[in-house]
């Protein structure tokens, strides 16, 4: 049983998890304040015979304080968020040396196209593998997302990466895996009755392993592992 | 277009339409030609038999990578191949749908048999890959795999359907309401899974076996156009004239390209 | 006090030409009867929505196992009692559709805008009583059309209550034909009903306030319903337009939302959420308003910061128009646009926080009476807070990435819509029940219902945050096929049991509601010792409400006012010797 986000598997996980924790602490404080306030007031100010409530229409000072504190917190949170948001999602943030792969989604499978030995997408030595995403570790990878039919969403929890694949749009989602091993890629946007079965396996290899895999596949190694 | 508008109107006003779909047997109860449809080898019918071959080298079928579905993969000793072209010994061609496309009396009506045609999803493949079925006859779709298959029918003259079977042992009956060669069946979870159903108003059709042979039985006397359909190689036709109870041969040869 | 006069007023009404049953209860133009009609119909839809939810929980807790009683479902929905994936997607879609459009929205707006606005303003009826009646009948028609989609070939929609195109626009991809058309038609009819209702509420609030009922003497419930009506009249037509375009895509072969022929998939999302986000506030603002009234009453104290509460409502409503893009952070929308939507979304937390703190301020040094409405209102404050705070996680765009479209957002929306709106309704229904039916709901059963609901509600929805953090995507039929989700399946089972208990406990409410109609204690004229104008009338209030337009002498929250003497409340309609009669407005209230 897991009570937290999945184990970190990409460079995005660090800042995102830290921010998650920060927001959890901020909202946690606010929540405790409110709930303790509720419980305290419920006990302390419960009706008793002969008591009368304190007649007041409010306090401008208190209201200014509890308007200003959330406002300042939210603006600060917005600034920090935006910094990482731009880093992760902005089109200009895709590293120039990223390894580009094509991820084509259709009901209900992922077709992943690799550039082959020449390292370039859209050339004759490209090859496509169904429902298997292989990437090298510690190297930036840019997934060029497209969709055949409806909206799907590329989601690898360990990488803290999610991006919709939208028909008619060409969207690039980049990431850099930091952990080798086998993971899962799910579809996060309802795409039809088989939505839940739209699962691909993700393999993060060492650079050498990855090169060997590409060579084997490009040589027509068939679909086997 | 009209059909679509009709169905809107239908949707808006016929709110109680039951979800069973078309069960109405459009063909009025026929004065069926005696034994035309049901009997396997009727004594007073003619027979067309033949062998189907192809010329050239068969295209290499890609291996199917079933590693994501361990339950399916385990059913094969060696990785299975796709079934676009299934060649037998001596260039025999299997999975060719052969049927009488013209020549039957225009007003003849045939009763669909009560036994269903079974389409089994086993090992993440369709069994059979090509099938023939009569209008109104039950197609029993069966899942023998412990995982999700959906069956999407892509049809022009029939109403398409898209149903799913998440568990092993599930079955579902469907019928077709109009003749159509072919209705495409596919599973969208396993992109390699394709099957084809030839829907005919009469029982005079067959699918070639592994040795490329087929036989159509019980034909009344007459001159017929016989068409052979293959998913990769297209169609071919032949004309066959049959007198009572005689047996004729019609061979087809496709060119592998 | 004034009760004797009003008793005669009630009998006076009987001297009018007697109305037939049909005219009085079915084709009624009386805003109170229309409100009650909405109440019965939408409670029924709430039950339907709940039944759909139970089936969803069965499947998520016990994927692939035959559901008890599932055998009665046709083979297009279940095989041997096992829910099929297509039916599961339909369950999810229709649960959302019914709850949002046919349960929560009509319960808050249809019932209480209708019932409360004229009563609380001292008006005789709505500005347009016949349009009001038409609004109810159209809403019922829309609900019946939506229900009918279960009985057509291929069943109801399969693309979520949000109907994302192109899935919803292409029958060949969704597998839905007639059901999709019915959804679109139903939404267009419902939108018409909402717009008619909203125009009515707006006109009534502007023109039909009794003399002395100035803008800032209106109770917060009326303020909230007024602002909600403005949202409704502006938002619903956008959805109607989008639904018509979706219908055309399905039926006429236009391609507004399908890029195959030049359409834009994201256009649907922009239109839907341009409606959809204001809709979220349509679903919560009236709840906030009514809870404000009830908390002030239960605390026997004026609402803390009345003016800032009003401006918070207006602020939320305004910001509600410029945050729709936060539903689309992962959609491929330009990330820079995402940044601006993030800022507006974070800012909306500010007026929400102001409201929560003002409710606390109201309870502070109060003299708290824990009647059932007050308990549920306190439940609302503490649960809405969780829903509001969990929204900040999604608003911060980088953090949204892992939790977007997971069970975390499911938890969030249920903390807002169940913990918020539904608890507010569990407060409002018993509170105004005597005004509707002349009897009280049973206090003991009400308290038991509150306690059990509060417990099982939290056990159901809180763990969803955790499985969402673990990555469980929304709307998936079987989480156990994923290795990373399998370890948290026990929590899914736990949630399912809690949900079944939560649903079962609602029998108490249904029983209490129905039983009290006949056997409830007869209500005194002002059972909650409240200040609202409605309590100057007998229970139930007669047709036409007041014989003569009443005067309003003060604000709605004068609890424990020093002027009240030995009582701890001072109603708006009570004239003290020091009060002067207000000058009637140029447009007389009522007619």
Image (cartoon, rainbow, N blue to C red):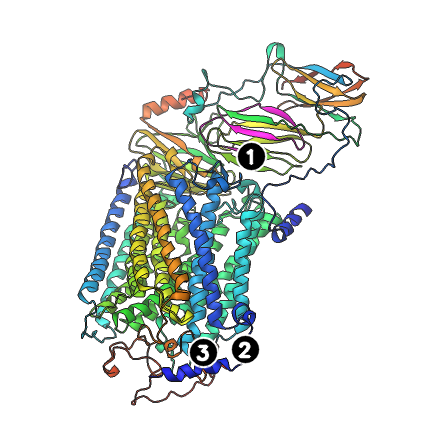
> In the rendered view, does B29 fall on the left or right side of C259?
right
Circles 2 and 3 on the same chain: yes
- Span shown in magenta: B124-150
> Which residue matches tag 2?
C18
Would residue C254 be seen by someone viewing this image from the given angle? no
Q: Tell me how far mark 1 sits from mark 2, CA to CA.
A: 62 Å
Local crowd size for mark 2, using a 10 Å CA cut-off: few (<14), some (14–19), many (≥20) = few
On whether residue B247 falls in the magenta region, the answer is: no
Q: Which structural element holds mark 3?
A: loop
Figure check: B65 above or below C160: above
The answer to which of C58 and C420 lies nearer the viewer is: C58
- The residue under the point 50% across, 75% down is C127
Contact between labelled residues 2 and 1, with CB atoms less than 8 Å apart: no
> Which residue matches tag 1?
B152
Q: Which structural element holds mark 2?
A: loop
On whether residue B125 falls in the magenta region, the answer is: yes
Figure check: B206 above or below B187: above
Say whether disc 2 or disc 3 marks the residue closer to the N-terminus.
2
Would residue A73 be seen by someone viewing this image from the given angle? yes
- The residue under the point 55% across, 49% down is C149
> Which residue matches tag 3?
C545
The location of residue B3, given as percent across then percent down, is 67, 46
């Amino acid at each position: 049983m897991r009570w937290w986000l999945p184990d970190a598997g990409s460079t995005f996980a660090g800042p995102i998890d830290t921010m998650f924790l920060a927001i959890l602490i901020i909202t946690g404080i606010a929540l405790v304040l409110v709930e303790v306030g509720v419980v305290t007031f419920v006990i302390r100010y419960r009706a008793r015979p002969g008591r009368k409530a304190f007649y007041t229409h409010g306090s401008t000072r208190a209201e200014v304080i509890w308007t200003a504190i959330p406002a300042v917190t939210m603006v600060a949170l917005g600034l920090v968020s935006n910094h990482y948001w731009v880093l992760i999602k902005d089109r200009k943030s895709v590293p120039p040396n990223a390894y580009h792969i094509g991820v084509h989604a259709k009901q209900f499978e992922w077709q992943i196209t690799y550039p082959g030995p020449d390292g370039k997408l859209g050339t004759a030595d490209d090859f496509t593998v169904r429902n298997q995403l292989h990437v090298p570790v510690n190297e930036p990878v840019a997934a060029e997302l497209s969709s055949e039919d409806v909206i799907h969403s590329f989601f690898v929890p360990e990488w803290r990466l999610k991006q919709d694949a939208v028909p008619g749009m060409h969207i690039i989602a980049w990431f850099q895996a930091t952990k080798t091993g086998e993971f899962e890629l799910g579809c996060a946007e309802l795409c039809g009755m088989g939505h839940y079965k739209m699962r691909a396996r993700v393999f993060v290899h060492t650079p050498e392993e990855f090169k060997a895999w590409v060579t084997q596949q490009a040589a027509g190694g068939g679909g086997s592992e | 277009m009209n059909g679509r508008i009709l169905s809107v109107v239908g949707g808006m006003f016929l709110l109680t339409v039951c979800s069973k779909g078309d069960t109405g047997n459009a063909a009025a109860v026929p004065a069926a030609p005696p034994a035309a449809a049901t009997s396997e080898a009727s004594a007073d019918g003619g027979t067309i038999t033949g062998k189907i071959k192809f010329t050239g080298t068969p295209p290499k079928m890609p291996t199917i990578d079933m590693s994501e579905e361990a339950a399916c993969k385990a059913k094969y000793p060696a990785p299975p191949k796709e079934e676009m072209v299934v060649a037998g010994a001596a260039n025999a061609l299997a999975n060719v749908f052969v049927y009488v496309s013209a020549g039957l009396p225009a007003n003849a009506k045939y009763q669909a048999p009560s036994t269903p045609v079974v389409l089994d999803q086993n090992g993440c493949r369709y069994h059979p890959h090509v099938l023939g079925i009569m209008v109104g006859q039950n197609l029993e779709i069966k899942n023998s795999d412990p995982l999700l298959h959906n069956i999407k029918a892509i049809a022009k003259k029939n109403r398409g359907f898209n149903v799913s079977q998440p568990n092993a042992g599930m079955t579902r009956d469907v019928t077709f309401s109009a003749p159509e060669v072919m209705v495409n069946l596919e599973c969208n979870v396993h992109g390699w899974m394709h099957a084809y159903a030839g829907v005919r108003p009469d029982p005079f059709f067959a699918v070639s076996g592994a040795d490329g042979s087929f036989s159509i039985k019980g034909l009344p006397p007459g001159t017929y156009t016989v068409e052979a359909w293959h998913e990769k190689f297209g169609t071919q036709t032949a004309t066959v004239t049959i007198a009572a109870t005689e047996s004729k041969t019609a061979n087809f040869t496709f060119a592998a390209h | 006090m004034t009760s004797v006069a009003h008793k005669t007023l009630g009998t006076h009404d009987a001297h009018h030409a007697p109305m037939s049953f049909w005219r009085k209860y079915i084709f009624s133009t009386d805003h109170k009867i229309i409100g009650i009609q909405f109440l019965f119909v939408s409670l029924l839809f709430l039950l339907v929505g709940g039944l759909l939810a139970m089936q969803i929980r069965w499947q998520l807790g016990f994927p692939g196992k035959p559901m008890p009683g599932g055998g009665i479902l046709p083979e297009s929905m279940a095989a041997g009692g096992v829910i099929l994936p297509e039916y599961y997607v339909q369950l999810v879609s229709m649960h959302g559709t019914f709850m949002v459009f046919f349960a929560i929205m009509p319960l808050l707006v249809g019932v209480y805008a209708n019932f409360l606005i004229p009563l609380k303003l001292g008006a005789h009826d709505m500005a347009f009583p016949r349009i009001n009646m038409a609004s109810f009948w159209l809403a019922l028609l829309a609900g019946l059309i939506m229900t009918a989609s279960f009985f057509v070939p291929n069943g109801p929609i399969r693309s979520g209550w949000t109907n994302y195109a192109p899935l919803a626009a292409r029958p060949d991809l969704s597998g839905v034909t007639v059901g999709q058309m019915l959804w679109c038609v139903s939404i267009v009819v419902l939108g018409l009903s909402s717009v008619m209702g909203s125009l009515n509420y707006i006109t009534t609030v502007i023109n039909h306030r009794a003399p002395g009922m100035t803008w800032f003497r209106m109770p917060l419930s009326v303020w909230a319903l007024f602002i909600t009506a403005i949202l409704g009249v502006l938002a619903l037509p956008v959805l109607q337009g989008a639904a018509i375009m979706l219908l055309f895509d399905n039926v006429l072969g236009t391609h507004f939302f399908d890029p195959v022929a030049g359409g834009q998939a994201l256009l649907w999302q922009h239109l839907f959420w341009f409606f959809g986000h204001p809709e979220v506030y349509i679903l919560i603002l009236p709840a906030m308003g009514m809870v404000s009234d009830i908390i002030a009453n239960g605390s026997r104290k004026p609402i803390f910061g009345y003016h800032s509460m009003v401006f918070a409502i207006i602020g939320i409503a305004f910001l509600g128009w410029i945050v729709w893009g936060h539903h689309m952070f992962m959609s491929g929308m330009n990330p820079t646009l995402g940044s601006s939507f993030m800022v507006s979304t974070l800012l909306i937390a500010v007026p929400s926080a102001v409201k929560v703190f003002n409710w606390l301020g109201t309870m502070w040094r109060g003299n708290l009476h824990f009647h059932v409405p007050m308990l549920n209102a306190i439940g609302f404050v503490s649960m809405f807070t969780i829903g509001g705070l969990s929204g900040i996680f999604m608003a911060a765009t980088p953090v949204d990435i892992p939790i977007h479209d997971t069970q975390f957002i499911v938890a969030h929306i249920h903390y807002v819509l169940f913990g918020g709106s539904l608890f507010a309704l569990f407060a409002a229904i018993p509170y105004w029940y005597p005004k509707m039916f002349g009897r009280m709901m049973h206090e003991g059963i009400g308290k038991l219902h509150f306690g059990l609901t509060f417990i099982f509600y939290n056990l159901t929805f809180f763990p969803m945050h955790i499985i969402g953090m673990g990555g469980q995507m929304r709307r998936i039929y079987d989480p156990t096929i994923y290795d990373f989700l399998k370890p948290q399946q026990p929590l899914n089972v736990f949630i399912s049991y809690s949900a079944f208990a939560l649903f079962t406990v609602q029998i108490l409410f249904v029983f209490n509601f129905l039983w009290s109609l006949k056997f409830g204690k007869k209500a005194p004229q002002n059972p909650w010792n409240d200040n609202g104008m409605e309590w100057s009338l007998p229970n139930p209030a007669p047709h036409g409400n007041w014989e003569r337009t009443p005067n309003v002498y003060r604000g709605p929250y004068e609890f424990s006012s020093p002027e009240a003497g030995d009582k701890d409340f001072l109603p708006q309609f009570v004239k003290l010797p020091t009060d002067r009669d207000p000058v009637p407005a140029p447009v007389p209230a009522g007619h």
